[in-house]
Image (cartoon, rainbow, N blue to C red):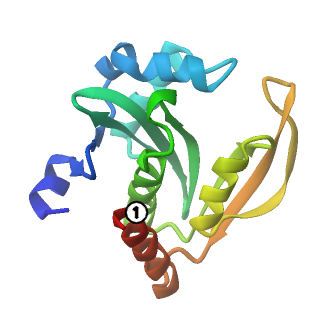
Amino acid sequence: MSVLERLLGREQDEGFSITPMRKRDLRQGILDIEAVAYPVGWSHNVFVSEIEQMRAGTRHYVVARQDGDIVGYAGVWFAVDEAHVTNVAVAPTVRRQGIARALMLHLAEVAIERGCVAWTLEVRLTSHGAQRMYEEFGFESAGVRQRYYDNVEDAIVMWCHDIQGDDYRARLNAIREDARA
């Protein structure tokens, strides 16, 4: 990614771009993806609140676009020296094309730039594909939150530590290279 692309808040990957999330993006695809990804997803107002917190620097949200259409989104919130992945969702029609991985690479870079030393997330107990992807990023299971999703489904709590080191940088570079292969 060029310095100009980073300054403009745009990243170009294989066939899609990653840009900062805007309020107008909610009705242009995010809420549709959210409705498919989660039985009880975030409301329009929750997303608006999260986007507004981006100005304060406590959140970071991006969308992935392919041929102008929003095909995915992801976000993270920051607490001192840790980052918490709030969501990663991709439209069903374009899953398994590397979009979630590219979104996670973006979030990893942002967390590292912010000085975070670790990051965490929750993932559905039944989302085995997502769990494998998070493991590629160095996340390890640290416990279970019972009935976390909609007071019904359990979540695995995953953590990844020491993200400021050379070993983690090498891991991200390997993921990036593997995606290009």
User: Which residue is depicted at the point 81% across and 43% down?
Assistant: 125
Q: Is residue 10 left or right of residue 18?
A: left
Quadrant in the picture for residue 28: top left
The quadrant of the image that shows the N terminus is bottom left
Marker count (numbered): 1
**Residue type pointed to by label 1:** Ala
Q: Is residue 50 above or below residue 109?
A: above
Q: Position of residue 89 (x, y in %)?
A: 52, 35
Report whether 67 appears left or right of 40.
left
Which residue lies under the disc numbered 1? 179
Q: Taking the image as drawn, is residue 145 in sight?
A: yes
Q: Is residue 42 left or right of residue 24?
A: right
Which secondary structure, mark 1? Answer: helix
Of 108 and 113, which appears nearest the observer?
108
Q: Residue at x 43, y 23 (%)?
A: 30
Front-most of 51 and 170?
170
Specify the farthest residue to the left: 4
Where in the figure is residue 154, as x and y percent of width and height?
A: 85, 38
Image quadrant where residue 108 sits: bottom left
Query: From this viewpoint, is residue 42 visible?
Result: no
Where does the C terminus fall, quadrant-wise?
A: bottom left
User: Residue 52, position in %: x, y?
Assistant: 39, 29
Mark 1, Cα crowd under 10 Å, few <14 / some 14-19 / many 20+, is some
Q: How far across and down, in percent of the image, does residue 102 sit?
A: 40, 53
Q: Which residue lies at the image location 55% right of the left edge and 59% below the top edge? A: 80
**x 44%, y 69%: residue:** 115
- Closer to the camera in the image, 156 or 113: 156
- Residue 7 in the figure: left or right of residue 151: left
